[in-house]
Amino acid sequence: KEAWDWCVKKLGINTGSNVIMPNLVEIGTGEGKSLTLAVAASVLALLGFNVNCACYSRYLSQRDYSEFEALFNVLGVQSFIVYDTFQQLSENIINERGDVRQRVRDLILPACDEKSQNMESRSMLNTHDDEKQSISNRASVLLIDEVDVFFNEQYFGEYFVLRAELKHEYVKDLTDYIWMNCSQMNCAQDAKKKSKNLKDIKSGKAYKQCKKAFNQWANIFDDEIKFMMEDIDAFNSPQYVVKDDKIGYKVGHEIFFAYDFRYKTLFAHYYEHFKNSAISEQSLNQKISMKIRCGAFSYAELPKRFDVIMGVTGTLRHLSQPELAIMKKEYGLKVHTYMPSLFGETKNKFHEQHDVQISTMERFNENLKSEILKRLNDHASPRCVFVFFEDEGKLKNFYECAEFQPFKQQTRIVTEKLSFDEIDAEIKRASQSNQITLLTKSFGRGADFYVKNGLVRNNGGPHVVQTFISLQLSEEVQIRGRTARQGGEGSYSMVLIAEELLQEFGITKEEIEQAQQNQKLYEMIKDKRKEKFADEYKHILSRLESAKNEHERGVSFLDALFNGDMKEIKEYLSTCNTHSSLSDANNFAGGWASYLPKKVRKWLNSVMK
């Protein structure tokens, strides 16, 4: 009963009026966020709710569900609890009345055409017997893990873009023709030359077959061909990964293979098949399709579908006022609960005046190597060191540099390219004595570095080095929290590059020298970060209204799609697939722009304009 009462209070449930208050809870890193979410989900399911636990990482989501699946089964609530990423949660909400992509495919592909590779139900206006799920009478609750991630630029103000893949023999003939005849086009060629190429395509047999078969949708096909011609010479940007006969892109902790970067992914398959033999013919054929945009939905609007929203984070007190204000205004998250540490004051050592180094680009590798070795050996026995980099490119540059060559044998690398099992194994190995581990920044959240090695635990614990400035203070706090967990010891330091500070935050050499003289270097960096974040968040908030309008158009389209309003369906599909209307980075990237670095998104926008 005491445990029940504790959970009920922390959930914000008023037992007198049976009201659940939207609530944000801060739980320190390494102090049981996953356990709290699992218990909260169980209590809410027992009270009669459907519960969705949403996380930014598929790796963490699957890990946490696996850990508590037995508990859910014992309580008999496994049918009412779902653990998903933000992307999969969006997918489920949009498709709750049925498979949107399949319905769009059924509309466009010729009915009962033996050349079509989509031989499921052909009628768009079929009964609802085949719908994915019946409407539940249970109220729904959304529990957000690391709620601050949802409210940053990767999701907030961005879209979840839905695209239907049209697979047909004529579509394959057309894409084969474009690859064979247009793949040498120069991205800088003038409009006249592009028009000539488009004219050549339209005069060919493959195009004429498509036009005849898909006559009432010919305008959409023309615009899709224009997209193909834009993407065919730029398929290797952004950088992709070839693994297990598939092509994927890095997102957070992992490589995603399920989403396409418009037609770039298709032509990457062509290239890897014909030029490198790294993709099989079967894999290529499975990827060949025409991608019809059938909705863009705002990540910011989708959570409003739930009756109650709650969230946990390790950094609630570090969120900015603009973030807290939008959480309160848009989602009613005005109740904040701060859970005291079970282990007392943190033993994470960080001296703001002495543990921040600024290095030139030229001296960075040498200085970072020296910092690693110094921290590795600053106690009686060797500790372990975790070094976090902003991206894999910077990590690999350091790992391969001449200065670090003698230490590669005792160094492990953790990036998004590893499988989940490999990630788990490397994280467990990272806490061994005399071990150096280089990681990308996405592993600064959620990765549990348990220190079982007595030499490490009794000699200062793991040391964390961060090699970049996080735009959000909450991210830095999370990275710092990979050590000194659950009452253990640990330490943290920074080795930064002066040229990057100037480029990213406008911090000049003179400002650095002045701050060092005044022993206020870290304080100055924090102030500069706060200024930049405020400016960036204004930009994020400015996108919310347009995202909301686009979302409402998408919702209206879904209503038309499931009600059989052909006039509105055709109007929406024609409008949102028009080449001239898709001029922003998110559409250019086929819905992936929200995962790109901000500089790349701005560059894409300028190019498309």
Image (cartoon, grey):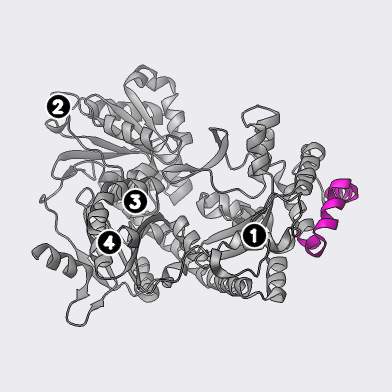
Span colored in magenta = 193-220
Separation of marks 3 and 4 at Cα, in angstroms: 25 Å
Query: Could you say where residue 407 lies in the image, as x and y percent from the top left?
Result: 34, 20
Disc 4 marks which residue?
A: 41
* Cα gap from disc 2 to disc 1, whole angstroms: 63 Å
Residue bearing the label numbered 2 = 455
Q: Give the residue pinned by disc 1.
A: 121
Q: Kindly identify the amino acid type of the residue bearing the numbered disc 3.
A: Glu
Can you say whether 364 is above or below 351 in the image? above
Label 2 – label 4 distance at C-alpha: 38 Å
Question: Circle 2: is it few (<14), some (14-19), or many (20+) Cα within 10 Å?
Answer: some
Which numbered disc, 2 or 4, marks the residue that appears first in the sequence?
4
Name which of mark 1 and mark 3 comes first in the sequence: 1
Instruction: Give the foreground label among 2 and 3.
Output: 2
Q: Name the residue that disc number 3 marks.
A: 475
- Choose the circle earlier in sequence order: 1 or 4: 4
Quadrant where the N terminus sits is bottom left
**Secondary structure of the residue carrying numbered label 2:** helix
- Report the Cα–Cα distance between label 1 and label 3: 47 Å
